[in-house]
Amino acid sequence: MLAGPALGALINGLWPSRLRGRVLHGVLACAATGLAFLVALLQHIQLGASGQESIRQSYFTWIASGPLRIDFALRLDPLSSVMCLTVSGVAFLIHVYSLGYMARDKAYVRFFCFLNMFTAAMLLLVTAANLPVMFIGWEGVGLCSYLLIGFWHARDSASRAGFKAFVVNRVGDFGFIVAMLWCYKAFGTLDLHEMAARVGHASAADIRWITLLFLLAATGKSAQIPLFVWLPDAMEGPTPVSALIHAATMVTAGVYLVVRLNALYHHPASAAGVVAWIGALTALLAATIAIGQNDMKRVLAYSTVSQLGYMFLAAGVGAYTAAIFHLVTHAFFKACLFLGAGSVMHACHDEQDILRMGALRNKMRVTHWTFLASTMSIAGIVPLAGFFSKDEILAGAFGANKLLWTLGLAGAFLTAFYMLRLLYLTFYGNTRIAPEVYQRAHESPPSMRVPLRVLGTLAIVGGLIGLPGSWHMLRRYLEPVLPVETGGEPPSALLEVGLMALSLAVVLCGIWVASALFLRRVDGQRCLERRLGEVYVALRRKWWVDEFYMAFVVGPLSTLARACSDWFDPKVIDGTVNGLAAAVGGLARGQVRSQTGRIRDYAIVILTGAFILALCLVLGRV
Amino acid sequence: MPADLHVSTETYILVSALLFVIGMAGFCLRRNVLVMLMCVELMFASSGLVFVAAGRDRADANGQVYTLLLIALAAAEVAVGLALVVAVFRNRRSVDVDLLSDLKG
């Protein structure tokens, strides 16, 4: 049943690469992903028609060791269905986009191979029925992320970025593994469904630690505090990679994990509060950093971190549906933004600095309107998709903790500000591009335009699945899987509308400031820098987080590693082994001296021995 | 003869021991192969003397019988030894035993 998407993509992923017929490979990859989407759609319908809550399919027994029995099983339920559709749908669009974007790249085939592999792994992750299978998908996406970030491995910065992503992710994986083992100890099973049923078996301490450890894993995958440092560097990879992996799919794996384990996080002793706080703080922190970035993709990267923070905030306060809703809408508008950025970069000859762009509005109509729509969506303008999802999160936060809500609101202001800044500096105003480049700047080919159109439209109308009140299709759909949410919507409708109005007002303020600075004046950037002064330097330098990690974590560890490899290993270990050998050798050489080859010496030895023997005999007698 | 013995058995043993030790010392300390062989003969002789003395002490004729056997043995050993010496001499033109240290090391 579910083997379709996973295997289809897998087979294509392992196809041997050939130089000729490149386009065929690309088309094949797109077809595989498209097939995956169709299968996901069919399964969605099938699930609805079957009237069951979920369908589980076991393929083979993977591990059978004593009482432990893990089989390779996949489960389809409303949550995984939503994820499947989102993942395969967006992945398909990005595959199509890549046909155009990567057309001139030499490693075209390898790209599609990895992209497909990634899609397969991600689909495995979201349809897994138990933790170990999910972990396979988890590791798989991590691996593909590494491969794709460092795709242009000849570039030093790219391969280092890939390495950084993988290592930081590994810290999270450590959390996952320990949590998984703990789960087995606490619940006696690793099947997700079973675990949910047996929540009562575990002690409060168990729940607290398990949820904390899974949170660690999620922060690694979804780039939250403290493991977000790999995401901005990951922008070294090709733009479709950034769109797919680091906006729409892989980074949402952490959110999916928390939502999937909602039975655990629902428990009073869980670390759900920590989740919410980390989410809120990350959202705010990343938003501040985004203001100080001039690289198009970096702004979007920090934006992703920030929006993921919102999703974690929602999950932490128990508003799981809101988290998934935002996940889906974010996939739409963020992917659209990244693809749009790629389009702009292609037109401007791989320029990424927005301070060197401008006035592209008329040159690239489609890119412009889709970028505009997505920007408005992420800022949260009614009635676009982002408005509904973000508002639902804020409403949930308000019900849980006013301070969290304030942080979220502040983040919304900043989001509007930096996104509009990005928009204006790129598309409006006077151009700061070199004339020859500007002359030749043109709109992208259809393979890139069509996905942009589709995603842009979805960014606009995607909110329909989550209209507040009784029209909330998504909540109704996900109800069987997610419990009644605590700290959900505030009771009265009036309060709800009030909150919506307030957040809308805040967002409009942000847009107004951005317009004042960047739309109407030419020296907006300089003005901003002057106004913020030293704060701006901190923002530009990302609050020196990377430097902090280098000094306090990476530095000591690599010093330790070097001490081990350069001193301990040669001197102590090799010393011991070689020393032993030398000692034996010395002993042997000492012994050799007794072999003189002279008969007289041997005779003396023999006679001495005989004499001693005789002595012993005589003395023994006495 | 079971008459009063002027020379006690202990004296014989002592002389024999002396002879043996002299033979042993000579074997270990002389460099000439032929002298070493002579020392071996000396050691043989000393043990023969012990046998005879013990036989006289116990009035048993077996002591002398063993001595005869010993002489035969010594003769055989000398034959072989001298043959070896001759072979070595033919190769090395010397009877210095210290030069035969090919097994060194």
Image: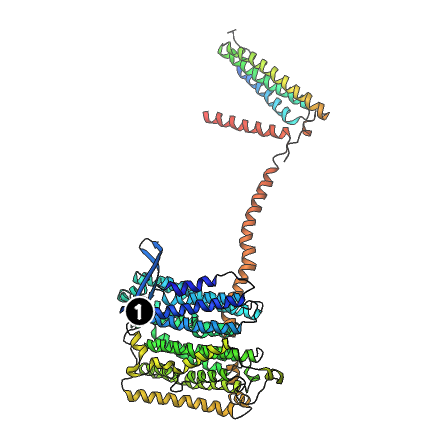
**Residue A191 at x, y percent in the picture:** 32, 63
Q: Is residue B26 above or below residue A343?
A: above
Residue sitting at x 48%, y 89%: A514
Chain letter of the residue beneath label 1 in the structure image? A
User: What's under tag 1, amino acid-wise?
Assistant: Leu
**Residue B82 at x, y percent in the picture:** 66, 19
**Residue A486 at x, y percent in the picture:** 29, 77
Quarter of the image holding residue A308?
bottom left
Q: Nearer the viewer, residue A126 or A57?
A: A57
For the C terminus of chain A, the quadrant is top left
Q: Is residue A222 left or right of residue B21?
A: left
Disc 1 is placed on an element classified as: helix
Whether residue B31 is visible: yes
Total label count?
1
Q: Is residue B12 above or below residue A277?
A: above
**Residue A445 at x, y percent in the picture:** 52, 77
Quarter of the image holding residue A73?
bottom left
Q: Say how the picture is coloured.
A: rainbow
The residue under label 1 is A47
Q: Nearer the viewer, residue A446 or A135?
A: A446
Residue sitting at x 51%, y 91%: A519
Q: Is residue A264 left or right of residue A172?
A: left
Quarter of the image holding residue A106?
bottom right
Q: Nearer the viewer, residue A427 or A606?
A: A427
